[in-house]
Structure formats: C-alpha cells, structure tokens
Image (cartoon, rainbow, N blue to C red):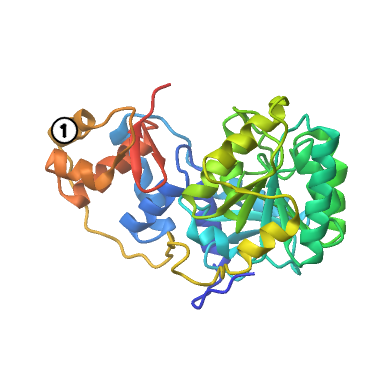
Amino acid sequence: MSQRGAEQVLSPTRRVAWLRLLRTDNVGPVTFRQLLSRFGSAEAALDALPDLLRRTGKLSRITTQAQAEDEITGLTRYGARLVATGEPDYPDLLNHIHAGPPLVTLVGGENLDWHRTVGIVGARNASSAGIKMTRLLSTELGERRYTIISGLARGIDAAAHRASLATGTIAVLAGGLDRIYPDENVPLAQEIVDNGGALITEMPLGWEPRARDFPRRNRLVSGLSLGIVVVEAAKRSGSLITARLALEQNRDVFAVPGSPLDPRAEGGNALIQQGAKLITCAEDIVETLGSVDPRRTALFDREWSTDFESEPPITLSDDEKSRLLASLSSTPVDVDELIGQSGLSASTMQMLLLELDLAGQIEWSSGQLVALRYS
C-alpha cells in the first residue's frame, strides 16, 4: 500500500502507547504530533500528560493501558487491523495531508491499488439521473483500474460503492467500525469487504458518528483520492466540504453539470464556475489524472515524520500565556505570524499552543493555522 522508503512496524507496546495517547481527550492528529515532537515518544508524552493537564486546569480522561488493549482485541473480532503512519499498510496518500491520522482502522483492502484512486461524492437524495451517472463513472473508472473512494452515505456514495464492488472500492466511515451509518448500508459495507474492498476509519470502536465527525471523515475521502468527483450537491452540503478539502490537499476537483432548475445541481455547477473541471464521462477524469504520479513528492507536501527527539522542558509564565491569548481570535492565523506578533520564541509558542490545545481552547486548520475555539 505504501511506497515510502523508511517503513517501520510499531512494536505491540508502542502501538498500545500510540493508541492511548491518540484516544486521550482533546488529543487529535495535530496535538498527537506536537506531543511526540515535544517529548520524543508516546510513552514519554503519556508520562508528562498528567502535569500538562493540571497546568491547563482542565480535567481530561487519559486512556488507560487496559482500554487501549481492549480496543485492539475488539478489532480482531471484526477482522480489522490498527495501522500506524510509517507502516507498510498505511495508505500513502494520507501521509501528505494536513492532520493525517496517526492510526487508522482497516478492514480488507490488501489487494487494492491505493495509489490509483478517485473519490466520488454527492447528494444523499440523489436523482435517478445522478445515480445513473455515478454508476457509469464508477464502472468505467474501475475498468481503467482506478479504486473508488466514497463515504458510504445514502444516494451517490452508495451508488459509487455498489458499481465498483467488482473492481475495488474503499468506504470511509465517520464512526467506529461497529457503528456504521446509516444502518441501511451495513449490508453494503459487508459486500465491500467480501468483494476485496476496504473499510477505513480513524474513530474508535463504539463511536457513534456526530454531525462534526462527517467533515472529519470527508478530509479522509479527499485525502485518499487523487481527485474528487462531485455528481450532485446542494449549495450547502458535505460534498462541497469534501471538494474544498480536496483543493486544500492539492487534489483535482471534477464536477458533473446539471440543470440550473434542480437544487441538487447548484453545488456542482458552482464548482464549475469556480474552476472545477466539467466532466461528462470517465475519460475526462482519466485524461487529467493520467499525468499524476502520487509518488512524486513535489505533488504533495508530506506532513508526517515518526522520527522525534525529546526537547528540553520549558517553564511558561502567566504573562506569556496572556500575550498569546491576546494575539488569538476566532480568525485562523499562521503560527509564524503569532510568533512575530507576540515576541515569544518558537519553542515557547509550541508549548503554549500545546497546553491550549489540550484544554480544548484552540482549533487547527490546514497550513498550520490556529484559532480560538468558541463553544
């Protein structure tokens, strides 16, 4: 699956430590990486977390060894495996997106081509014409040896998966492996695995997907794809979020045009007006993606490294924290700009942001932009 040169496999002990750290409250992919960068390893970060959390004044749950081991044991009942970035089975394209998940749960997909991939997304209440177009695109792309990525939702997503069962498809889940949404697509998920496809999620077992989890899933749909095809989408829809994320990740965006009289075509038509490539057949997609080599590092800026060294401890003052908070707002700002405005050193800034992140006071977006989080 991966084509990286320095692949490594986590030891069972380290895999448990990574999972414990990642499943701890307010530790997402960005915070996870910052903790490893600061302390050198997940084990050292876990040792430091109680003191860090005391300093934030927030009571947070740290995942226990037993809880992490139970999750890993539970995954085996589903024939699933927990894969870390840097390991051979980790999808390589996810190494090149902002906030790529340090760990993913995978079922199936051992023989899929994870490098020749096209994401197809669209309306849940799709029209008959939209479903027909999705089937045609998925079938033709599959015949051209492309693996189809989608989010297992009703409508366009489900049609894309069904049409590519024989040639290869990957369903990205918003919840845990045992909490597939919607329920009606549980049989489809099983069909995908039975036909050699794959299910993938970054969420733990038992996790019921919430509204906020679907945009998080969408970044993986686009991140796993060389290009995203929007078949039908309203002006405000998850499909347009996926298209925006694809652009941020340097992926190609394609859209099927529709009637101006159909609200389900408004989003796709708007994307075309904004520069997305208008497509009428699979060949339009193949012509564009045929020149894309996912192994060419110039195409995607790689975000991840698993080689970390611990940094010396830093004592933070209340004045430094106040200066940082005064520089932050609800508008995302670049970290380098924050350093310049506040006069704080880069190492101090990193530690302050780490504390605020663990306290749930900030949120990250692509390009190392940070903003205050308001509940």
Image quadrant of residue 52? top left
Q: Is residue 282 left or right of residue 51?
A: right
Residue position for label 1: 323
Q: Position of residue 37 (x, y in %)?
A: 34, 57
Q: Position of residue 298 (x, y in %)?
A: 44, 68
Please rate how many residues cluster around mark 1, counting C-alpha atoms within 10 Å: few if below 14, some from 14 to 19, many from 20: some
Residue 14 seen from this side:
yes
Q: Position of residue 29 (x, y in %)?
A: 47, 48
Quadrant where the N terminus lies?
bottom right
Image quadrant of residue 187? top right
Q: Is residue 114 left or right of residue 182?
A: left
Q: Position of residue 212 (x, y in %)?
A: 57, 31
Quadrant where the C terminus lies?
top left
Give the number of callouts. Answer: 1
Q: Is residue 98 left or right of residue 367?
A: right
Q: Which residue occupies the foreground of this view, 252 or 181? A: 252
Name the residue type under label 1.
Answer: Arg
Say if 111 sits above or below 322 in the image: below
Q: Secondary structure at mark 1?
A: helix
Residue located at (29% from left, 28% from top)? 329
Residue located at (49% from left, 42% from top)? 24
Residue 51 seen from this side:
no
Residue located at (47% from left, 48% from top)? 248
Image quadrant of residue 239? top right
